[in-house]
Amino acid sequence: MDLKLLAIIFLITLIVLTSGCSGNGTNIPESPKTNDLSEITESDASGTTEPFTSVSDYRQQMRDFVIGISTYSKQKNPDFMIIPQNGQELLTSGGEADDPIVQDYIAAIGGVGREDLFFGYDDDNVATEEEDSEYMASLLDVARDNGVVVLVTDYCWTKSFVNASYRENANRGYISFAADSRDLDTIPDYPAEPYNVNSNDIQSLDDAENFLYIINPEESGSKEEFLESLQETDYDVILIDLFFYDLPLTSDDISSLKTKSNGGSRRVIAYMSIGEAEDYRYYWDGSWSTGSSEWLEAENPDWGGNYKVRYWNEEWQSVIYGNEDAYLDMILDAGFDGVYLDIIDAFEYFEE
């Protein structure tokens, strides 16, 4: 046979075979896709084997953390109150007011806190832009309408601003505190009495008309002076730190705060950050530094000594609750009526 004819036949056969292979997608497995972040493991990124949390999961991981804290604490004290501050986007599945409500998260909390709703968002003693206020309030309304008490802390001291803060919050059905210091280290001189002062017994957040938020005792010369300044007030709810400097307050200390100056009972709530680790806390190990553990992240540039954490990590969560040395367990043992959870919006750090 002519060599030229043989060459043509060979080329035609080769073309037919190769086109058949490339066109038959069912016979050749596709390469695994890695553009879905939920399928990427942390071993792909850093050589570790800890499961990676997808961008879409960061919010749910924080919800799960709060729910775990609530479930654990209520086993010890069924009336214990869980109040996450900020991070109101967790109330709904998509972070918007018209998205479906996350029912198990709503059921786990008794209140939600929000800073800067009407004053302080851009700068202290400055009105928050209406657009920002309305966005935050739209989600806080979801909480209010589902039986969750809303506690707002505005940062302002001009009397007209203080009046406006209390008025605007009351109009929306929130209870509020106009703090005259971002450091939360003072009992404001104005107003002279708490807004909506009363002598009622406060058994739950639903009974409260006002609250005081003071977690920094620097203005007091001693623990006794600090406690006495609180005992002399008529606030329905007091939010304080478990510690007076390095020493935890005792159950007797907390008990002494549970009666208002006018005789009515009140609730005492402990502040606790769960989205950052603080190097001035009892649990801090001097050998820790950014990257020294699987859960410790970068230092917060705005708050020295505070470090972002991978809050879904079991080792970090064991610092917060579940054993006799854990932070929450110390709060429960001291006789607090609830816990005010800060840095709930830590999910934003990981999403970005």
Image: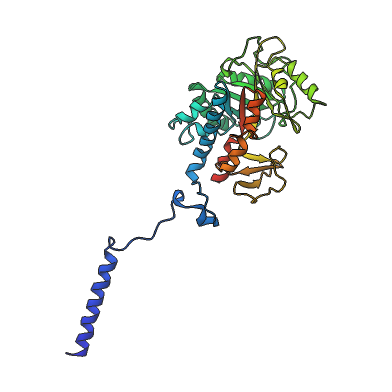
Relative side of 124 to 168, left or right: right
What is the quadrant of residue 211 in the picture?
top right
Q: Residue at x 23, y 73 (%)?
A: 16
Q: Which residue occupies the extreme left position in the image?
A: 1
Relative side of 127 to 145, left or right: right
| Residue 168 image offset from top left, x and y in percent | 60, 21
Name the image quarter holding the N terminus: bottom left
Q: Which residue occupies the extreme bottom position in the image?
A: 2
| Residue 123 image offset from top left, x and y in percent | 68, 34
What is the quadrant of residue 347 in the picture?
top right
Residue 269 seen: yes
| Residue 340 image offset from top left, x and y in percent | 62, 28
| Relative depth, front residue between 290 and 12 | 290
Residue 128 seen: no
Q: Which residue occupies the extreme front position in the image?
A: 324
| Relative depth, front residue between 120 and 192 | 192
Instruction: Tell me if residue 335 comes above or below residue 96 in the rendering.
Output: above
Relative side of 33 to 16, left or right: right
So how many labels did they put on this image?
A: 0
